Image: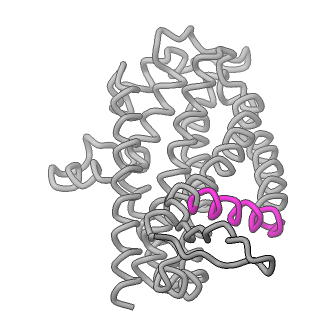
Amino acid sequence: ALPLTMEPSGIPAKPEQPHRKPSEFAKLLILMKRANIQLYRDWTVTHLKLFVHIVCAIVIGLLFGDSGINASKSISNVASFLVHILYLWYTTLMPGVLKYPYEMNILRKESFNRWYKIRTYFVASMLTSLPVQIFFTIVYASIVYLMTSQPCELERYLMFTAVLVLNTIVADGFGLFLGTFLNEINGTFIGAIMTCFMFVFCGFFIMFSHMSEAMRGISYLSSHRYGFEALVLTAYDDNRADLVCPGDQIYCHYAKPNTMMRELGVVPGNYLFNVVTLVVHFVAIKLASFWTLKRKLRHG
């Protein structure tokens, strides 16, 4: 029975209600609100990053010009895909590497005091950061898509943007994994080294047909391979019309879109497979990040 207290008048007061522990969902909302406040206060995470994305997108757009439609610049257009992947990868990877080591002491105290479960914090952090990263990626992708004269088709634009968004969130997961598994210095170093290796195996610097069987097998572990192939398919697959050959060029070898895909060894109609594989990479790296975070908090 609930305890009764007496008012000064002698009339029994209402029984005291027991304190109810907030649900895990309520804690999730509170953590998301706190994370949003931190994002709002730290202008380098939002305003500066958005400004840098816009400036870099304009510079890259001016650099590659009309490579998306000019048959004499097809190699440059394909190279621009790698630039997009590399830029978004690094600008997302490094903050992820540095995030959890910076917050680890606070997180260790709050989780030790059972303010919330680790998975609640992890989900709140992910749900807060992903929309911001997706928005920045869409802004960047929209600018470079228009400035490099890619096909003026809504479907191709959406496919192009979707691949870059997936590349960004995979980079975020990879950065968080390194940040929860290593310290800041080692995480930054290993992140840079792993990124270089993944780019080597993307299929542009060395063709898959030129690799040994063992090296070609390793290439399937690189998320950049799937992102690069998906961007190539976005630009040159699905019965795209011939590219424009400038009047000052006698012959344009890549005027036919299929020529580029054939030389790169990209299988036509394989866009969905590459996208699904990127999603699998994202889920796998997020689960690995959660496991390493939980392990680090438990074992110090």
- Magenta segment: 27-45
Residue at the front extreme? 10
Which SS type dominates the magenta stretch? helix
Residue 198 falls left or right of residue 24: left
- Image height of 165 relative to 89, above or below: above
Where in the figure is residue 45, as x and y percent of width and height? 75, 64
Which residue appears at 83% of the width and 61% of the height? 48
Which residue appears at 58% of the width and 52% of the height? 127
Magenta stretch holds residue 6: no
Which residue appears at 59% of the width and 80% of the height? 103
Q: Nearer the viewer, residue 30 or 197?
A: 30
Q: Quadrant of the C terminus?
A: bottom left
- Image height of 256 relative to 210, above or below: above
Residue 118 falls left or right of residue 213: right
Q: Nearer the viewer, residue 168 or 127?
A: 127
Q: Nearer the viewer, residue 5 or 110?
A: 5
Where in the figure is residue 122, as x and y percent of width and height? 49, 64
Which residue appears at 47% of the width and 8% of the height? 239
- Image height of 16 relative to 261, above or below: below
